[in-house]
Image: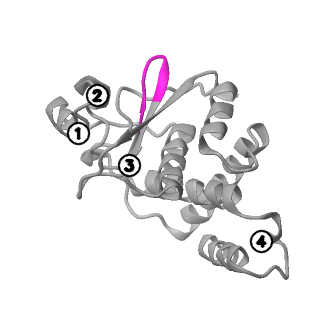
Amino acid sequence: MTSSVIAPRCTRLAPAQRGGPIDAHGLTQLRAGARARVLAVLTAVPLPRPWSMNRWVDGLEAWRGREIDLVPVEYRPGQPSGAWQARPAYDLIAYTEHTSALHQDHIIAHELAHMLCAHTGSCLMSESEAAELAPDLAPRALSHLLTRVTSGRDEYEAELIAVLLMSAATSEPLAVQPGASGRAADQARRLAALLG
């Protein structure tokens, strides 16, 4: 499946477009939609075993027919830990450079979720702010990328999809079966309780 929706230059919502709280019915629909989206993506692009985000992104690129560039950036307090930007010929995902590999994978999964859901909007960062955050990259490569104000719905959906993807990527098959025990099983049960 090729995504037919390409976001504008920047992929986040401006303050005037922020969404309000999600009601119980909307939350149920959002969860069901997120689960369906994850199932569809994982059916088309199965998770590699052993897990490798880079190998999975390679599969997503082939499935979507678009390259996805992963760019590590320095995290600064108060700044987002990741961002996605749809460029004319490829997608760019920035993620925090100095954190654990598992945290990086989660950040990337969250941004991939924004990409797969085609969340769109306006950016708030200037080219000089982008140059300060990522001095080794051309300012235009990251301008309007990292500072964002998003709708609660888009962020919740992206985070839910990221949690579902990373849970599937890092859990053992027994962890989701009845009667399973151990750390992975406990994490899977907590996740299931959280997601309803």
**Three-letter amino acid code at the position of disc 4:** Ala
Badge 4: few (under 14), some or many (20 or more) residues near its Cα, within 10 Å? some
Decide which of 185, 99 is in the foreground and name it.
99
Mark linked to residue 175 = 4
What residue sits 77% from the left and 64% below the top? 172
Disc 1 target residue: 124
Single out the mark in the foreground, 4 or 1.
4
How far across and down, in percent of the image, does residue 114 sit? 49, 43
Give me the C-alpha separation between circle 1 and circle 3.
19 Å
Earlier residue among tags 2 and 3? 3
Disc 3 target residue: 96
Mark linked to residue 137 = 2
**Three-letter amino acid code at the position of disc 1:** Leu
Q: Could you say whether the residue bearing mark 2 is in a helix, strand or loop?
A: loop
What residue sits 30% from the left and 42% below the top? 146
How far across and down, in percent of the image, does residue 153 sit? 46, 55
Earlier residue among tags 2 and 1? 1
Q: Could you say whether the residue bearing mark 3 is in a helix, strand or loop?
A: strand
Q: Could you say whether the residue bearing mark 4 is in a helix, strand or loop?
A: helix
Please state the extent of the stretch shown in magenta in the rendering: 84-91
150 displayed left or right of 67: left
Earlier residue among tags 4 and 1? 1
Single out the mark in the foreground, 2 or 4.
2
Give me the C-alpha separation between circle 2 and circle 1.
18 Å
**Three-letter amino acid code at the position of disc 2:** Leu
Give me the C-alpha separation between circle 2 and circle 3.
15 Å
Give me the C-alpha separation between circle 3 and circle 4.
29 Å
